[in-house]
Image (tube, rainbow, N blue to C red):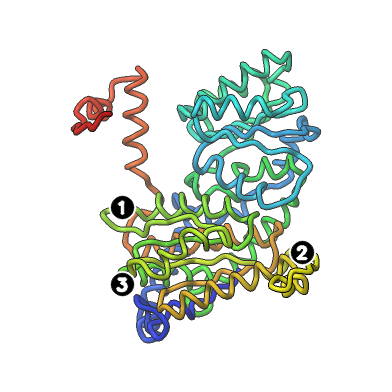
Amino acid sequence: MNVDIGNALASVASPGVSRESLERLDEQVAVAHERIERGMANEEHGYEALNLPHRTDPDAIRAAVEPVADAEALLTVGIGGSSLGAATITNALDSETETVFLDNVDPEWVSSRLAGVSLENAAINVVSRSGTTAETLANFLVVREAFESAGVDWTERTIVTTGESGPLRDLAARHGLPSLMVPDGVPGRFSALSAVGMVAAAVCGHDLEALIAGAAAERETLTGSLFDCPAYAYGATTYALDQRGAGVNAVMPYAESLETAAEWFAQLWAESLGKDDLGQTPVRALGVTDQHSQLQLYRAGPRDKLVSFVTTRERPDRSIPATDVEELAYLGDATLGELLEAEFEATEASLAAAGRPNVRVELEAVDEYELGGLLYGMEAACVLAGELYGVNTFEQPAVEWAKKATRGLLGGGEFEEADAVAEKTELRVER
């Protein structure tokens, strides 16, 4: 992963960061890096995520998925960090295995997704650290019933990834299901490079060693200076721009295969940094599609946004056929890849010309090695940003509040959070 922060400098953009300000900020980066290294060395909660390249065992993951290695479709049942990392990897890479991620409980959508899968040739990958996540357990029960209705023994087609104890761990033991551990000390949104994110990749036949190697290579770039470390350059620059008014971070991949990576980033950034009235709001965009929807706002709207482009140097390509329409003849001399690259460069330049800050995150290609580096690099950037903000990057109390309220509303216990629902202030406008 390479990062270019040139278009975020004050000489280009407003808000922007001067070189002098970055050099002063680099002193804070050095202190933060020491804290991060100490947390990793002591295997502290959260910081342990940055040790995953040396902890994750690809052989153990492949052994666990062996009973369903022939699956033509994989239903991954999870939500948030238990789903998005796996989806980022498998959606970015080609595979003959169909992947379906059940990460919502909209009944119409769930039914539609299940109806589109041949369950006789499918497998289930259920992921929940606690084993009590309401959405995950509800969908798992629905999927299990669907398998039974189709005459398929779900116990022969299910893999479980969960914590040391809990209902899912008990279920796996009772039915002899292959199971893997959600690693201790690693919050879900930081777990893509563990079994949580790699079971689906293994079933799809992707190169787990290359994913880990890419992450390990990114780990080696972590130093005490943002000028020597792409991940820290990104984390420090986004923090500095937020401090100067760019409170929105629009992540815009110029590769359809990386669209889910923007979703994964949104959870990572929002849930980790959104505390104590601080944090930058992540927005998902896609090049070139959103040039025709959001770009107008980014170039001419309020100066409260950073655009983070994610692009790749190499990609499969396809020629544009020649045409006898004179006005379109120039397209016949190009490829779709060249058009995509020209659109990216034009968009990047248009923002710079308007003085709007933007950063380029560049991969060599969309493959396992580069994906491993991207996932690890963005996680490290997030941890650094958390240190600079002074927040606890690894907790999510606001999310836990809503979980308790939901459980209370469904009769899963007495929770005062559920009482707040009845206290809602209404001002209804009805037809």
Identified at 77% across, 74% down, the residue is: 333
Nearer mark to the viewer, of 2 and 1: 2
Q: Quadrant of residue 31?
A: bottom left
Q: Quadrant of residue 179?
A: top right
Counting residues from the start of the chain, the first of labels 1 and 3 encountered is 3
Q: Nearer the viewer, residue 401 or 13?
A: 13
Label 3 Cα neighbours within 10 Å, binned few <14 / some 14-19 / many ≥20? some
Q: Which residue is identified by label 1?
A: 275
Identified at 50% across, 33% down, the residue is: 104
Which mark, by number, is residue 317?
2
Q: Quadrant of the N terminus?
A: bottom right
Residue type highlighted by circle 1: Lys
Q: Nearer the viewer, residue 113 or 209?
A: 113
Q: Nearer the viewer, residue 157 or 150?
A: 150
Counting residues from the start of the chain, the first of labels 2 and 1 encountered is 1
Which mark, by number, is residue 244?
3
Residue type highlighted by circle 3: Arg
Residue type highlighted by circle 2: Asp
